[in-house]
Each structure stands twice: as structure tokens, then as C-alpha cells.
Image (spheres, helix red, strand yellow):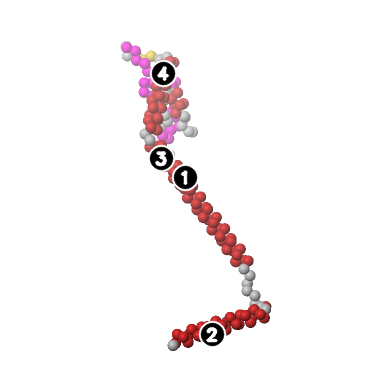
């Protein structure tokens, strides 16, 4: 069973749950536990006896205790460490999002380029077999080959001289 809320423990005039406990702690300072398990404020009379406090006194005591707790909590926030931690975590998160966005954009660009390359490769048809080339193209190819051969031969001869 989980520990009661802090406010519930305060209303019972008890300390908050100790670790691992499912009940509020002992009575707060200046409170005594009666035979029914209730914490009652101890009020000392000049003779040294204790008396049961009035409802107004109990409310004042609870309000004072809660005010002291709020003061310590707000002091921790004014310290600035939690604020710095929040700023650092926020900046780290934003940076991570920016890096993720840049990586995603690059990935998409590479995917588009790969798809474009695949499409271009599929569009290029294989060269026609030699026997399906027209006779004029064959003659032109042979002439170009012969010219290239003669040009290389001439270069070789001029280098020997």
C-alpha cells in the first residue's frame, strides 16, 4: 500500500512516511499521541501540566508548519541549480532534434539520388547487336577505326625519328 500524501500526514500532525513505510511517521514536535492514536498539540500551562489546544491553535500550528515547508521548497528553486538543469536538458533535446532532422534530410536526399540512378540505369537500353546495325553505320565505324589506327601508327613513327 503506498504512503499517504504529505498533506494527509500534515493534517494528522505527523511526520511524512519513512522510506519503505505505508503509514505516516511519528507525531510532529510539540504534539503528543493520545490513546486513540491521534496527535494532539502539547500546551504547557505555567504549572507544567499539558492541556488540549483549541481548534484555532491547531490550525495556526499547521499553517506555520506548511509555511516553513513551502519556504524551504521555494529556497531550493531560487538556488538556480534546477533551473540550470532544465535549461541544459532543453538545449540538449533541441540539439538532438536538429541533428536528427539534418540526418533525416540527408538520408532522404540519398534515397532520391539512389532511386534516380536506378531509374536511369533501367532506362538505358543495351547496345544493339552488331548484326542489327545498318550497313552505313558499319562502314562509318570501320572508317573511324582505320583512321584511329593510321593516326596511332603515324605518331609511333614520328616518335622513332
Q: Is residue 89 left or right of residue 145?
A: left
Q: Magenta stretch mostly in which secondary structure? A: loop
Front-lying residue, 40 or 68: 68
The percent position of residue 42, horizontal first and vertical second, equals 37, 18
**Disc 4 or 3, which lies upstream in sequence?**
4
Q: Secondary structure at mark 2?
A: helix
Q: Which residue is mark 3?
A: 85
Query: Residue visible at 57% across and 82% down?
Result: 145
What separation in Å lies between label 2 and label 1 (alpha carbons)? 69 Å
Q: Which residue is mark 1?
A: 94
Mark in the foreground, 1 or 3? 1
Q: Is residue 72 visible?
A: yes
Region rendered in magenta: 19-46
Q: Quadrant of the C terminus?
A: bottom left
Dot 3: element:
helix
Q: Which residue is mark 2?
A: 150
Q: Considering the numbered disc 4 on the image, is that residue within a helix, a strand or a loop?
A: helix
Magenta run includes residue 9? no
Q: Give the CA distance from mark 3 to mark 2.
A: 80 Å
Q: Are marks 3 and 2 in contact (CB under 8 Å)?
A: no
Q: Residue 12 — which label?
A: none
At horizontal 41% and vertical 16% (from top left) the residue drawn is: 57
Which numbered disc, 1 or 3, marks the residue that appears first in the sequence?
A: 3
Residue on which disc 4 sits: 60
Hey, which quadrant is residue 128 in on the image? bottom right
Between tags 3 and 2, which lies in front?
Answer: 2
Amino acid at each position: 500500500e503506498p504512503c499517504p500524501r504529505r498533506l494527509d500526514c500534515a493534517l494528522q500532525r505527523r511526520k511524512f512516511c519513512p522510506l519503505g513505510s505505508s503509514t505516516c511517521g511519528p507525531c510532529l514536535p510539540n504534539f503528543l499521541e493520545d490513546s486513540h492514536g491521534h496527535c494532539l498539540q502539547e500546551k504547557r500551562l505555567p504549572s507544567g501540566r499539558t492541556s488540549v489546544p483549541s481548534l484555532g491553535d491547531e490550525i495556526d500550528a499547521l499553517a506555520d508548519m506548511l509555511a516553513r515547508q513551502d519556504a524551504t521548497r521555494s529556497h531550493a528553486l531560487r538556488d538556480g541549480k534546477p533551473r540550470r538543469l532544465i535549461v541544459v536538458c532543453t538545449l540538449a533535446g533541441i540539439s538532438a532534434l536538429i541533428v536528427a532532422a539534418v540526418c533525416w534530410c540527408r538520408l532522404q536526399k540519398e534515397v532520391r539520388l539512389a532511386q534516380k540512378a536506378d531509374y536511369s540505369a533501367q532506362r538505358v537500353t543495351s547496345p544493339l547487336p552488331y548484326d542489327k546495325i545498318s550497313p552505313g553505320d558499319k562502314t562509318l565505324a570501320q572508317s573511324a577505326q582505320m583512321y584511329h589506327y593510321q593516326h596511332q601508327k603515324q605518331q609511333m613513327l614520328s616518335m622513332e625519328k
